[in-house]
Amino acid sequence: MGTALYACEVPDAGGDTLFANTYLAFDALSDGMKAMLERLVAVNDSYKLYPGGRSKHISKLSAMKDAYNDGSEAMQSEHPVIRMHPDTGRKSLYVNTAHTLRFKDMTVDESKPLIDFLSEHSVRPEFTCRLRWQNGAVAIWDNRCTQHFAVNDYPDEYRRMRWVTFEGDWRQ
């Protein structure tokens, strides 16, 4: 449902977090695109997050059955591409290149151009903000209508964060 992130120690420069409002991303789509997306279901694959998984193994992802190095296994889940927030009733876009492998009943190759378009669309500057962390800062966001991305631009420094994820469910 949501996440809280607390900055224990941040680098002197860099280490920001980018946030994208997926309500705004959905609202900016054409009516034709919205109608088409309403019928689609995204297949998300946790293996895409595995080191090297995005670039080296994209063609093997849907058949991946091997365990990760830590003993856990890759998981797939299905989610509607357009999700309605259970509290606000607003629709949001739920697709990204980090997790979305393909659309249900479509191949990875068929899905990729639309996933790429929607992912790039979701992070247009007018839908985003950037948080410059300070020690002791706290950010809280709703995972149901927000995407986030930690900028890894502090190679010789350290960033230590604590997070809590709030459990919740979707009502369709």
Image (cartoon, rainbow, N blue to C red):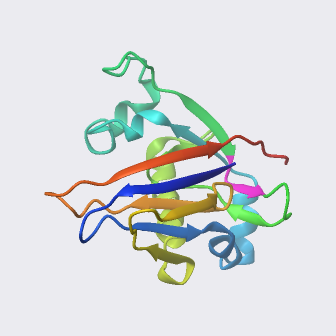
Of 109 and 42, which appears nearest the observer? 42
Of 6 and 74, which appears nearest the observer? 6
Q: Residue at x 56, y 78 (%)?
A: 127
State which quadrant residue 64 falls in.
top left
Is 35 left or right of 2, judged from the image as shown? right
Is 153 left or right of 16, judged from the image as shown? left
Whether 106 is drawn above or below 30: the answer is: above
Tell me where the magenta segment starts and ends, as one range: 80-84
Is 163 left or right of 53, judged from the image as shown? right
Whether 153 is drawn above or below 107: the answer is: below
Of 38 and 85, which appears nearest the observer? 85
Of 85 and 59, which appears nearest the observer? 85
Q: Residue at x 74, y 55 (%)?
A: 83
Specify whether residue 4 is painted magenta.
no
State which quadrant residue 8 falls in.
bottom left
State which quadrant residue 158 falls in.
bottom left
Q: Residue at x 46, y 47 (%)?
A: 162
Whether 86 is drawn above or below 68: the answer is: below
